[in-house]
Image (cartoon, grey):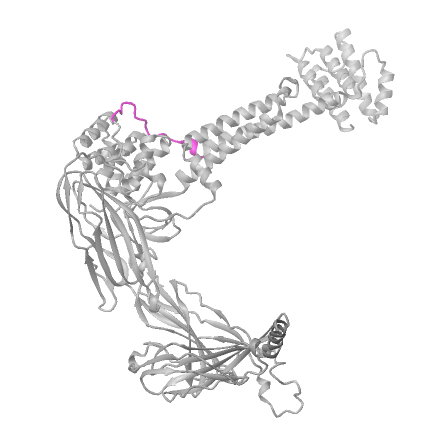
Amino acid sequence: MKRVAIMFLFGACFVFAPTAWCATRISMTVEPKKISMYDNASLQITIESDAQDVPEPKLPNLVDFQIFSAGSSQSVQVINGKVSSSVTYRYALSPRHPGRFNVGPAVVTINGTDYTTQVEVVTVNDVPANQHPAPGHNEVQPPPTKTRGEHHVFITASLDRDTVYVNQPVTYVFRFYAGERLLSNPEYNRPSFTNFWVEDLPPQRKYTTTLDGIPYDVTEIRTALFPAEAGVKTIAPAEVTATVRSQSRGNRMNPFNLFDDGFFDRGEPLHLATDALKLTVLSPPAGSPAPPFSGLVGKFTIDAKADVKSVNVGDPVTVHVTVSGEGNVKSIQRPYRDTLPNFRIFSGGSSEDVSTTGYEISGSKTFDEVFVPQRAGTYSLPAFELTYLDPQSHAYKTIKTEPISITVAGGSADFTIPSLNLHPDQLSDIAADVRFLKTEGNDLRRHESIGMLGTAFWFGHALPLLGLAGFFTWRRRVLKDTADPVGRRRRRARQSALRLLHGADPKSAAAIDYAKLSDALLGYYSDRYNLSAQGLTRAEMRARMEEGRLSRPTIDKYLELLDECDRGRYAPGGASLVPSDVLSHAEQVLVEMEQTR
Amino acid sequence: MKHIVAILFVLASAMAAQAQDPRALFTEGVSAYQRGQFDSAATVFARLAQSGADDERVWYNLGNSLYKSGHVGAALVAYRRGMRLAPRDADLSANYRYVRLFAVDKIEPVGVLFLQRWWNAAVDKVSIFEARWAGAFLFWLAGAITVWRWWPTHTNGRWLPLWVVGCLWALWIMATAASATCYARDVARRDGFVATSQTNVRGGPGDEYALQFVAHDGLQGAVERTESGWYLVQFPNGLKGWLQANSFEII
């Protein structure tokens, strides 16, 4: 019996499995749920099922709306051999009259089973046309023209104001209208907002609208701009690139277009650009009251709260000053306050809370001010003031906090570190006061002419650097000479000879040191040929010089000079040349010999 | 009152010409300060500085006097001038850091690489004179040792390892780099502070340009350009704007 029961259960699994596994889910969304008479709501029904054939859902009876089909999309997944599909049907609901309406349930029947969605409630407001929130006041309603050929895709850009003050926010609204299926995600290139501080206003808004009877899916991106300077500013065009179905697909009657089907259509790129926008930015009006204009433009309030109202001398009272409102919240500066005798006042940290709810920049910024009383008594902490520009009334407005009364009880002023919102390494810096004066001034330094800072310093560096370079040049030469003494003698032969010749220079035209002259000439010979000239005969010297390719006249002159020296030394009065001629001859001979080196 | 700081810093040259004994002026300034006459003390110390006394004690006392008379930005300028001369003076550093807390605008400086931060912190501890003297000394020392070691006619210096000479030259390069950094900090870069209670920072050099934001007393910046009585100032957080030259005191 037990075995029969198990077999029955096993068989039942097989019988009912297809139905049990045929999981189906249906869901419905309506966005937005609050619309005006001039808006459309987007109804989206998604059916997820692993059934082979998913029929279109039956829509509820929506007599209060006009319904336009906005197409469908299907995605199929195959995971571990199991096929499941998800089909999304989109509709645009255009209200016929204001009120609160139930939308749903939608029903789909799969394999004989009805699947129903939940019911959504949509509220339709009767908003006058001049308060129409989208596209908004001063915003340009897009023309229902097609941007290119027959494509129902276009973009628009608009500003919610055409004249603003410097620092007053203006909302840039970009809209992408798609009245047909796109084959790729559109790529949005935001314009470069030169001369503006930019703040994104998320989230993107998606809705459906009908233009000339064609339903469009609209994607709306908002950006807050804060003009930084006055003048007429131009905002460059925004651009979008999208891929749409090819135009040729329209020719259904062409019998030769066998493969002209959406499945084979790779689409064609579509480049769209908006017009450039002009914005007039005004300077703040003249005549700012005290305290001076803070640069804020919008609508702001100010509030101050003290953490304690009763303290001892030296104990800190922290006042949190909060400026909140709509406008350039991030630019809020610390409000002005008067000084307060008998208190040390420290500026603490600040925090900000910026919100973009409702596509408006709003929020608050809180500043901490720490008051440390030095004497007992009852005090009124000064009011914090701030002047901003109200763009609606085109006038400056000054807001201020209420004075805060505190009571300070007597006690020793030990100046404990107040609870400033400071980095820990700054805490040690918080003393009670600046350190005291330096009273010793007998040896004050005068202002120095600091040539060290300029040319003199660098000259002082450059000169030794040149010296160092010179040293290494000289060192290289010395090492070279050390390594090649013969070459060194040869290179210096003429120099040494001339030095000796000048030593033989006569004091008077009548006298000459022939011995020195002879030494110079023989020394040159020895240095040049690396031979000792002593003991050589004239013939040996001639032979050597001829080997050295000296010309015969030069050799003759050289040997004649040596003979002249011998005559001058050993036979005074026998010299044939006057002393000054001897020397000039000697120099000339050396020059000639040097030239044939 | 708005331009009192500028007046203090640029006192009439006639007064400077009639310069009194610096010691007497110093004592007069100290007495005024001790009596609580901080404006008078500031005037006396400014005269002293104007007359050529370039001593960190004068700048320190001037900074104290200006701070006590409510001029945060001008006090910071005076302290920084003193710190150029005595960068390791604990009193100057302490008062400078203390008075900075009273600067209204707390802005986050643009981050720098840790190496640059480390280098700047190290160089802040030396004055330009010290860096240059150290550079000059190391240059001569390294040069002399190099010549001695490589003198061609003797080998006495050869025992000295090459790395010692290399280190000396490396130290010289560091000292020269420190000099250059000090030069950029003290001379080339025109750092300064907003020295009025508040001033409008505009998009161009004139009142007709758009107001960008309001800067307050004690906000630090660096002057990039000057044009007809206006400074183009870059602030530590990277923002730039034009402000009137008489509202900004260059160190």
State whether the magenta stretch is mostly helix, strand or loop: loop
Question: Relative to the observer, which residue lies in front, A190 or B27?
Answer: A190
Residue B126 is situated, as x and y percent measured from the top left of the image, at 41, 32
Range drawn in magenta = A439-454
From the viewer's perspective, is A396 left or right of B183?
Answer: left
Q: Is residue A141 visible?
A: yes
The residue furthest front is A1
For image coordinates 60% across by 29% down, the residue present is A469
Q: Is residue B244 visible?
A: no
As drawn, B46 above or below A4: above
From the viewer's perspective, is A127 left or right of A516?
Answer: left
Quarter location, residue A387: bottom left
Residue A328 is situated, as x and y percent measured from the top left of the image, at 31, 61
Quarter location, residue B93: top left
Residue A122 is situated, as x and y percent measured from the top left of the image, at 36, 80
The image quadrant where one finds the C terminus of chain A is: top right
Whether residue A453 appears in magenta in the rendering, the answer is yes
Residue B202 is situated, as x and y percent measured from the top left of the image, at 32, 56
Quarter location, residue A210: bottom left
Q: How many marks?
A: 0
As drawn, A101 above or below B177: below
As drawn, B87 above or below A590: below
The image quadrant where one finds the N terminus of chain A is: bottom right
For image coordinates 29% across by 33% down, the residue present is B59
Question: Relative to the observer, which residue lies in front, B89 or A34?
Answer: A34
Whether residue A484 appears in magenta in the rendering, the answer is no
As drawn, B30 above or below B158: below
For image coordinates 27% across by 25% down, the residue present is A441
Question: Relative to the observer, which residue lies in front, A478 or B106?
Answer: B106
